[in-house]
């Protein structure tokens, strides 16, 4: 499992348009990584610049905000706090 506190924007950019498996109690659900964006405002002592990622479902999904396990061949497993931002999209922010 990759460390969420040290993963970088570049590592996610290398995964653009790859499918991440959202692990749910009753199986998995595919989400495509469709966006990686810098957020700016980094502090001098910060380990990395803040960034966000957008994950898109192929159909509408109801995803209450919370921490979810995502798995992808390139990065492995990640536990991310996701916020749904549209009927088919969720976002994770890395500070």
Image (spheres, rainbow, N blue to C red):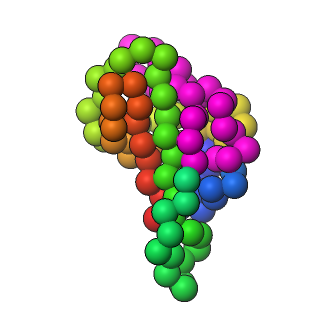
**Image vertical order of residue 45 relative to residue 16, above or below:** below
**Image vertical order of residue 26 relative to residue 17, above or below:** above
**Image vertical order of residue 68 relative to residue 36, above or below:** above
Q: Which residue is farthest left?
A: 64
- Residue 47, quarter of picture: bottom right
Q: Residue at x 61, y 44 (%)?
A: 1
Q: Looking at the picture, how far across and down is residue 51, in whole percent?
A: 52, 58
Residue 84 shows in this picture: yes
Q: Is residue 28 magenta?
A: yes
Lateral position of residue 3 relative to residue 73, left or right: left
**Image vertical order of residue 74 relative to residue 10, above or below:** above
Lateral position of residue 66 relative to residue 5, left or right: left
Lateral position of residue 72 relative to residue 63, left or right: right
Front-lying residue, 10 or 80 = 10
Q: Which residue is farthest bottom?
A: 44
- Residue 35, quarter of picture: top right
Q: Is residue 59 magenta?
A: no
Residue 79 shows in this picture: no
User: What secondary structure predominates along the stretch shown in magenta?
Assistant: strand
Magenta-colored span: 12-36
Q: Looking at the picture, how far across and down is residue 4, in whole percent?
A: 54, 54
Q: Residue at x 57, y 35 (%)?
A: 34
So how many labels did they put on this image?
0
Q: Residue at x 53, y 20 (%)?
A: 30
Q: Looking at the picture, how far across and down is residue 81, in whole percent?
A: 38, 46
Q: Residue at x 51, y 46 (%)?
A: 53
Q: Looking at the picture, how far across and down is residue 22, in whole percent?
A: 48, 27
């Amino acid at each position: 499992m990759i460390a969420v506190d040290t993963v970088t924007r570049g590592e996610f950019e290398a995964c653009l348009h790859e499918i991440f498996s959202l692990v749910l109690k009753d199986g998995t659900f595919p989400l495509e990584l469709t966006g990686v964006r810098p957020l700016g405002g980094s502090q001098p002592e910060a380990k990395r610049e803040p960034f966000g990622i957008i994950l898109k479902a192929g159909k509408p999904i109801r995803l209450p905000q919370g921490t979810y396990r995502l798995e992808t061949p390139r990065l492995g497993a990640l536990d991310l706090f996701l916020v749904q931002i549209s009927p088919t999209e969720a976002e994770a922010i890395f500070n």
